[in-house]
Image (spheres, grey):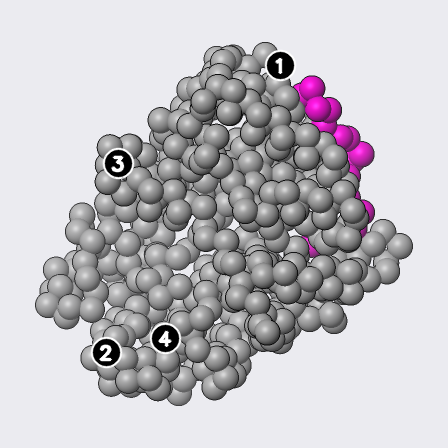
Amino acid sequence: MEIKKRRFEQFQDWIMGMYLNNDVAKNSNIKVLSRTFTFQVTDACNLACTYCYQINKNKRRMSFETAKLAVDKLLSGEDGFGEYINPNNSPAIILDFIGGEPFLEIELIDKIVDYFKLKTIELNHPWAKNYAISICSNGVLYNDIKVQKFLQKNKDVLSFNITVDGTKELHDACRIFADGSPSYDLAHSAALDWMKRGYEMGSKITIAPDNLKYFSKCMLALIEDGYHTINANYVYEEGWTLEHAQEFYQRCKEFIDIFHSKYDLANYEFSLFIETWAKPLSSKENTNWCGGTGLMLAMDPDGKLFPCIRYMESSIGNTQKPLIIGDVFNGLMQKTCEKQCVDCMGKITRRSQSTDQCFYCPIASGCAWCSAYNYQVFGTIDKRATYICEMHKARSLALVYFYNKYYKKNNIANVKDLWVPKQWAIPIIGEEEYNYLVELTKSLGGYVNENAIMVDIGDKTLDFHKQENYKNIQILKND
């Protein structure tokens, strides 16, 4: 008998559902109802993955006393913690545990979680019921008895991911032990075991120039393994070229054709193929996409505090100074420079960090960035790195192919408009393929943006599937 999986609903979505009619949710200053506190319990790892962003790994481990102090101050709000995160601006909290490899410190994690539960109950704290635990592991230690006990004890509040890079060929080319030996069999068997127990296993495919050719095979391999939610992203770092965008579109198309012939989209979610992306954004949509400017808080093994893990020395390397905003012993934002840093981050918007070309881009929706990587590259958070531009164009074209093929095949009265200008599309997919997308879109009654490379839809959030709204769009620049 097949076990029906318990899909771990995105915690933010669950909390939002609880608070839809709550005064907190109606407060326009609160955009996210759950924030994250990350414990980097160690910066050691039992793997040596080739693409890891943590370039300065060490052997440090967090003490329980340091972790305990962090929990105490999170719950009491003492020493500046309450100014940053509290039950009013975050009715729920996510306790995130990372490394290195977090399961190297499973006993510490277990003690931290137990202490958090105990203290919230003692204090009758709002987070006693509104919390989740998030862990992403390489899976090597999954079968350790202490790991298994922890997983079972916390399974109902646990968002658990084991990184499996789709196929064995790709995984073992990148995710290796220090001696070069492979890790796929360990990670893959661990992920399958968790799913066989009736739980949804999260996924993470990291797309880089060197592994782009594996994309379609990896996506299909995860589906065949039983994954229903597949998170994939291309790296933000410099190195993407037009040739990569051309190959990415072809790999997406290869995956899409096979997927539509074998599977029902209603049963799957893909972070790369979100229907509402690849169109203009209203000027009202001005928040910073990345949560690393105030929605997360991270602590390294020594107790130093950061806006997120990517600002730590282990991640940022020697390119910039680690962006420290306090420490658990002396408090958060207790120094003038730390307070000014946090205040500055809170003022950063999509407009402030974007050029006109980015802000008014006809496919601005879904184009992401990492604030910490911006800092790493430019020495400031308030400037967007745009190395993914060609890849976002390719993904936007693939979205049109993905959804309009699906709508047409299933006679669904919907359409994905084609907002990628012709002059951007032709170099990536060629004129014949572009004309096919145009005809496919128009056959469903959709809109095709021929030439506009900068558009302004003002302060309105338009329903783009109502053609009468297009007359309100101001073309700022054609090629």
Residue 382: name its quadrant.
top left
> Which callout, 2 or 3, points to the residue nearer the camera?
3
* Amino acid type at mark 2: Ala
Amino acid type for the residue under numbered disc 4: Tyr
Q: Is residue 263 visible?
A: yes
Position of the N terminus, as image quadrant, is bottom right
Residue drawn at x 66%, y 55% is 162
Q: Residue at x 15, y 68 (%)?
A: 466
Coordinates of residue 413 in the picture (x, y in percent): 23, 78
Residue range in magenta is: 44-66
Q: Earlier in the sequence, mark 3 or mark 4?
A: 3
Residue behind mark 2: 413
Q: Earlier in the sequence, mark 4 or mark 1?
A: 1
Mark 1 and mark 3 residues within 8 Å of each other at the beta carbon: no
- Give the camera-side residue of 81 and 55: 81
- Mark 3, Cα crowd under 10 Å, few <14 / some 14-19 / many 20+, is few
Q: Amino acid at mark 1?
A: Phe
- Report which quarter residue 220 is drawn in: bottom right
Name which of mark 1 and mark 3 comes first in the sequence.
3
34 falls in the magenta region: no
Residue 431 image point, x, y percent = 39, 84
Name the dominant secondary structure of the magenta segment: loop
Left or right, residue 286 beside residue 270 = left
For the residue pair 393 and 82, the one nearer the viewer reads as 82
Relative to 69, residue 357 above or below: below
Q: Quadrant of the C terminus?
A: bottom left
Give me the C-alpha separation between circle 2 and circle 3. Answer: 34 Å
- Please give the residue where the numbered disc 1 appears in the rendered image: 329
**Mark 4 = which residue?**
403
